[in-house]
Image (spheres, grey):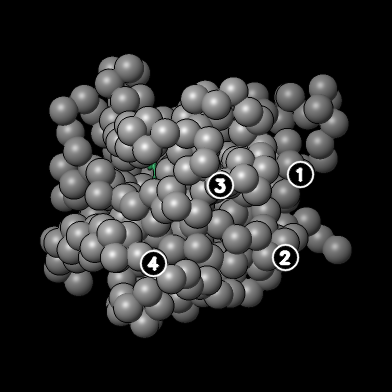
Amino acid sequence: MARYKIALIGGGQIGGNLALIAAEKELGDIVIFDIPKMEGIVKGKALDIMQLRPHDGYDVNINGTSDYKDIEGSDVIVITAGIPRKPGMDREDLMSINLDIMKDVAKNVKEYAPDSFVIVISNPLDAMVYTFYKVSGFSKNNVVGMAGALDSGRFRTFIAMETGYSVQDITCMVLGGHGDSMVPITRLATVGGVPLTDIVSAERLTEIEDRTRFAGGEIVKLLGNGSAYYAPAQCAMEMAESYLKDKKRVIPCAALCEGEFGIDGYFIGVPTVIGCGGVEKILEIKLNADERSMLNNTLDVVKKTVSETCL
Ligand code: A3D
């Protein structure tokens, strides 16, 4: 069987790490695409990762390009094209710049890789994934936004830091929009099956939920120039891997809801099953009154951001 082909649209901080992780997982041949003025940089990154192969032993090819023709026939596309947040900017501030970029990317992906599974990472995430979907005309199964995986991973990290228990045994999900209105479903979080609410005090849990909501901003502030890139890349590659290997992992992702959770016509973070059919299913859970009210609130935020795309 021929190798899969993975195209990364945007070869910046996340793009470079996506290439490295995809290569290390031996998911397929990799193309890193960026605008012409970045061509040297993506070619350099590609060559650098190629030269890591003898040490890690993975047999995939990595190329950098600024020619969309090179993404032709890709199985998976991961989009990070755009600008990241700078201190003082919220995700919505990025809207006007990244909207034009996403429209251009969507047209080209439609032309050169019409059957691909597309994972959007560019912010503001909920609006960018919606824009890609609308402009490309792709099926809803083939378009998904990476956010909930990262937000849930951040929540798990903070719980592990709090309890000292293995992060591997901590399960939880964070739903809703990718912004400060996200909804950690703490009630259902467990540590090795033991309810988290039996282990950590309600007061501390509230603080941890808040830290999770602002975790992206915490990193933006620390870095001083740009946003998180290691964990976002890993999360997107887990989603790509689940698609390519038909793993059917259940991952919180921004998927198009058509009635699920009472939401219609919006991409928002919900538990999704990712397999060879792309987003194969959204798993619904019964929310309590508080969670429902938080989900309604985050949906309002998503609707407002999406309305700014004027699509
Ligand atoms: P950065 O290192 O600036 O990389 C973005 C790349 O996009 C740059 O190399 C640009 O040259 C390139 N680019 C710009 N315009 C185009 C275009 N028209 N076509 C192709 N490439 C283009 O940013 P980054 O990698 O740190 O972040 C990328 C995006 O991800 C930003 O929008 C971030 O806000 C977003 N992000 C999202 C999350 C989520 O959890 C959703 C987390 C972290 C970052």
Mark earlier in primary sequence (3, 4): 3
Mark 1, residue position: 26
SS at badge 1: loop
Can residue 33 be seen here? no
Comparing marks 2 and 1, which lies closer to the viewer? 2
Instruction: Give the CA distance from mark 2 to mark 4.
Output: 29 Å
Q: Are marks 2 and 4 in contact (CB under 8 Å)?
A: no
Instruction: Give the CA distance from mark 3 to mark 2.
Output: 30 Å
Comparing marks 3 and 2, which lies closer to the viewer? 3
Q: Which residue occupies 24% across, 28% down?
A: 86
Q: Type of residue at label 1?
A: Glu
SS at badge 3: strand
Mark earlier in primary sequence (2, 4): 2
Mark 3: give few (<14), some (14-19) or many (20+) Cα within 10 Å.
Answer: some
Q: Type of residue at label 3?
A: Pro
Q: Which residue occupies 72% across, 61% down?
A: 247
Mark 4, residue position: 287
Q: Quadrant of ligand 1?
A: top left
SS at badge 4: loop
SS at badge 2: loop
Q: Type of residue at label 2?
A: Asp
Mark 2, residue position: 246
> Is 245 on the left or on the right of 76, as rendered?
right
Image coordinates of residue 168 in percent, x first then y, are: 66, 37
Asked if ligand 1 lies within 8 A of label 4, the reply is no
Mark 1: give few (<14), some (14-19) or many (20+) Cα within 10 Å.
Answer: some
Comparing marks 2 and 4, which lies closer to the viewer? 4
Residue sticking out furthest to the bottom: 259
Mark 4: give few (<14), some (14-19) or many (20+) Cα within 10 Å.
Answer: few
Q: Nearer the viewer, residue 181 or 228?
A: 181
